[in-house]
Amino acid sequence: MVLTRKRAILLKCTECLGWEENPRDCTGTLCPLYPYRGLTRASR
């Protein structure tokens, strides 16, 4: 498996959320990866 930028961000965000939640549900706006974690449900 190739580790792309998108996959690395997804894995880091999932780890930060305790492997339980979807990174799209993250509310940690102070995180430097926050803008790169993907579209939120609110922005759709």
Image (spheres, grey):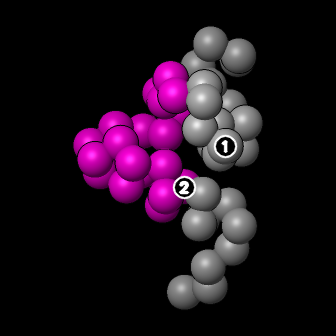
Camera-nearest residue between 40 and 34:
34
User: Which callout, 2 or 1, points at the residue further toward the start of the chain?
Assistant: 2
Residue 10 image label? 2
| Rendered view: 42 above or below 14 | above
Query: Residue 22 sits in which quadrant?
Result: top left
Residue holding disc 1:
32
| Rendered view: 28 above or below 19 | above
Direction top: furthest residue? 42
Horizontal arrangement in the rendering, residue 33 relative to residue 21 (left or right): right
Depth-wise, is mark 2 or mark 1 nearer the camera?
A: 1
**Residue type marked 2:** Leu
Q: Secondary structure at mark 1?
A: loop
**Residue type marked 1:** Pro
Q: CA distance from mark 2 to mark 1?
A: 13 Å
Q: Give percent across and percent down for residue 1.
A: 54, 86
Direction bottom: furthest residue? 1
Q: Secondary structure at mark 2?
A: helix
Q: Is residue 19 magenta?
A: yes
Q: Which residues are magenta?
A: 10-28
Horizontal arrangement in the rendering, residue 1 relative to residue 16 (left or right): right
Q: Residue at x 69, y 73 (%)?
A: 4
Q: Residue at x 28, y 47 (%)?
A: 18
Task: Confirm whether residue 38 shows in the render.
Answer: no
Q: Give percent across and percent down for residue 21.
A: 34, 38
Direction front: furthest residue? 30
Horizontal arrangement in the rendering, residue 14 relative to residue 24 (left or right): left
